[in-house]
Structures are given as C-alpha cells and as structure tokens.
Amino acid sequence: MKSTHRAVLALLVSAMVAPPALAQNLTKERANILSVDWNVMQVRLKDPQGRERTWVVSKDATVEFTDKREQFPNPKLADLVPPMYVHFTYKADTKEIVAFNVAEVGFEPSKAKDPGPASASQQQAVITAVDVNVGHVEVQLPSGRKTFEVNPKAQLRNLKAGDRVTLTISKQGDREVVTGIRRR
C-alpha cells in the first residue's frame, strides 16, 4: 500500500512539474513572408534554407512586433505583409500557425500605411487568366498564383493569358488591388 501511495504521489508531482501537453505540441520556426491571403487564412513563407511553403493560420493567431513596435500599437493579422521576417509558432500535429512575432519589418511602416503612392508596390508577373467583366486578373507571381481585383477594370481589355506584365498593387483597406498594369 505504501509503495502504491508513493507511486501515485510521484505521478502527481511529475504531472505538476511537466509542461502541459499543449505546450509540448507547439513548434517554433522563422521565415520571410512572401504573400498572405486572409480570405483563406494562409501565409506563404520562405525559411532561411530557401524552402517555400504555404501555411494555414488560425483565425485567432496572435501577432506581436519586436521590430517597430510603436508603429503597430494594436497588432493584427492584417498587419503581416511581405517582406517581414517573422518567428512563428505552430501546432506540430495540424501544422496550423497560432502565433507570429515580427522580428524585422523590412520597410518603413508609416510610408506603407500612407494612402498615397508610397503604399503601392510593383510586382513582375505572368497573366494566367483575365475576366474583364468582373475586373479580375489571375497571375503567376514568384510566390505562386494569385487573383487580384483590378480598378479600373478597363485596363484588362487588351490583355490575355501569357502576357508578361508589371503590376502596381495598392493596399485598399485589408485588400490588395491592382491599380496599374503595364506589359513588359
């Protein structure tokens, strides 16, 4: 009886000292953000070894900024954009990201959030599909395929699949919209 009592006591003590099961299930990595799609809760990342992967992100994932913290007082998923360098935590069993820590922003946030021309970026792409009526273009970017709304959509009239273009992409709210398309 005494040995059973000791075994139960030892088991209880080890359970209190051992980290919770949830913490054992979490894994940390680091990477640069290549692209984000919050409509489907995914982020494409490139790790230090050059491997690219698309990750699923939990809707309640936490975001923290180590770099330029004062410029992101209420950090949220929508603040995560390329080319930020992040440390992220994911569930090892589901491979779902549950936390981000931005170690390096990679640009001057005050300029990127400005509604003027500084908020626009340019990307080289190849058109894979065009829908002039809806005003959407699907393109192949270095980070993968992506569909953009185009405004004004009249820019799409003379474009077709296979055209090599330079896109001017502007942030409008939490969406990325193509505001300019130029053939290369």
Image (cartoon, helix red, strand yellow):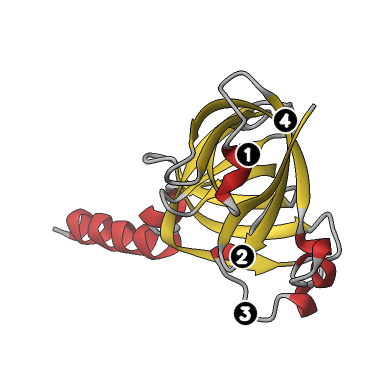
The residue tagged 2 is 172
Determine the residue positioned at 53% across, 66% down.
Answer: 62
Please tell me in which quadrant of the rendered image residue 160 appears: top right
Task: Answer yes or no: is residue 94 visible.
Answer: yes
Amino acid at pointer 2: Gln
Q: Which label number is shown at residue 45? A: 1
Secondary structure under badge 4? strand
Regarding residue 145, the answer to whether it shows in the image is no
The residue sitting at the top extreme is: 162
Q: In this view of the protein, which residue sits in the foreground, 56 or 150? A: 150
* Badge 3 or badge 4: first in the primary sequence: 3
Instruction: Left or right? Give the position of 39 relative to 73.
Output: left
Where residue 165 is drawn, which disc sits there? 4
Name the residue type under label 4.
Val
Please name which of the two marks, 4 or 2, marks the residue nearer to the observer. 4
Q: Which label belongs to residue 74?
A: 3
